[in-house]
Image: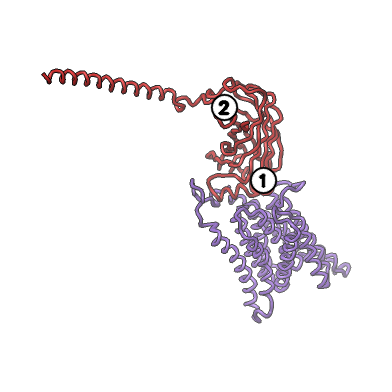
Chain colours: A red, B purple
Amino acid sequence: MSTAPISHMNHTTLHRSKHLITTTVLCTLGCLLMLGVASPQQAPTVPAKVATPAATAISGPQVFTVDDVHSMALFRVQHFGAGQFWGRFNDIEGNFTFEPGKAEGMKFDITIKVDSIDTANDDLNKHLRSPDFFSAKDFPSMTFKSTSAKKADDMVYDVTGDLTLHGVTKSVVARVEYCGMADMGRGLKAGFEAQLVIKRSDFGIKYGTDKGAIGDSVKIIVGLEGGVAKK
Amino acid sequence: MELDIIIRAVLTPTLAVLVVMLLLHWISNKMHSWTLAKHGRRHVALYFSLNLWMPILVVIPPIAAHFHLQPGLEWPWTTAYGQLPVSLLIGACGAMITTYFTKQSWQLTGVIAVAVCSTVVLAPPGIGGVPQHLIVALVATLSSCGIAQSATQTRATSFAALMVIAACASVMCMLSGFAKLSVVVAALSAGSATFAVAAMFFPSVHLGRAGATTFACSLTACMFVGAGYDESGFPWWIWTMLALSPALMGVSALRAVSSRPGVRLFAIVATPAAFAACAVATVVLTSGAVFKQSNQSTPSESYGTDRQP
């Protein structure tokens, strides 16, 4: 009398358990699959889609103060006619004015401290700071002040400005890519990546150029992130 | 530093100076006999004497090296390195004027004036104040008197001592991270080496008081600039030691050191050379300028002359 119901009950419980486990596994796989598809690593080309100009609506141009922790300036130059040598400047400050989608009113006023040069080698840093190259004690900072900007593409701008380096000021054009704008609870932030190529001999930094030991042409890449203080 | 730069910036102007010196030596001898025979006067020949032109010959190699590495005269001056050739030229021209002073008191006044004038135009970053200029002028004066004391007694020996001192100073500049200044000081050393060789063959080749003043002012000016741009944080007294080391040539040349001329000649070279070498050794040992590993977490490969352009 007692074995049949127990057997029937066990069979039902077992069937439900199997169904539950199968459902759980399928759900988990489904979730993992969805996460995998939506992962940023799978779609690195459109980071700005997170916050497109349309996504963050602001009224009029905003002034952003450069966040020195999340901003950096890199430079690249050919060494001994062979490899491309990279270095960076760690201290970058200033501000930029921007309204998404508009070149009018776009302004950059950026200052980089030459003393913050970093090539991951102390002796090379010293040599680069000396008058052989940047003469950091005579010219402690380099600056870029924009004079005009025009839209080159949907997210790209050509910004003309005065670059002061090694005591010499010259007009240069930087290609500036708008990376995005968002407010994630710590005030409105905007980001840009600027690229330009200069001839260092134009700025009086000629050491090693005569025989091409160090390239004259220097590529500069500046990653900027700035924020508006939260009201 | 490429060998090519050493040849073009250091050896070429030094050889040019040697040719000019030999030419002056020949003209001086010819003019001397010609003026005596024709007019019975000697002062025309003096205008072509090596004693008068030695200050210019001393500064030609470093100035040529400077302009080779940084073509064109910088104006307005923005760096003390740009001011350096002007300082060297003021020192040389001032020293040429002092050759006309016959009284000892006037000679000393001339040396002080030249030291002050040649260093006052320099304003290295951070150390361009009046007290520093006074100290630098004092060091240049002491060095000048020391070299002059030795140069009036010896010819090739004085040049040899100056060659070693300048070589040590050049190494110091290289260690501080200022390669261009290192080449300029190396040219000063190479010039002294050339004069030392020439002095062994031609008796009229000697540094003289004016040459001594020029060399002292040139070395002091280079060390002053080097201290200003020092990126390695070497103590200021190390730079002063190097600038002051020629003063020991004068101390070694005193009769009180030894009555034997051979010992004095050895002391004139060895004492300042050892003093200058001590300065460089102190820097190397205390700062680890040569042996240390990079403090960075990433590549710690050494950055030596084989990697520099």
Cα–Cα gap, marks 2 and 1: 33 Å
Residue closest to the eye, A121 or A108:
A108
Q: Looking at the picture, does residue B42 appear above or below residue B185?
A: below
Question: Residue A140 — which label?
Answer: 1
How crowded pointer 2 is (Cα within 10 Å; few <14, some 14-19, many 20+) is rated as many
User: Does label 1 lie on the same chain as label 2?
Assistant: yes
Q: Looking at the picture, does residue B42 appear above or below residue A149?
A: below
Identify the amino acid type marked 1.
Pro
How crowded pointer 1 is (Cα within 10 Å; few <14, some 14-19, many 20+) is rated as some
Chain under disc 1: A
Q: Residue at x 53, y 50 (%)?
A: B303
Chain under disc 2: A
Quarter of the view holding residue B102:
bottom right
Q: Residue at x 57, y 27 (%)?
A: A182
Question: Residue B281 — which label?
Answer: none
Identify the amino acid type marked 2.
Ala
The residue that label 2 is drawn on is A182
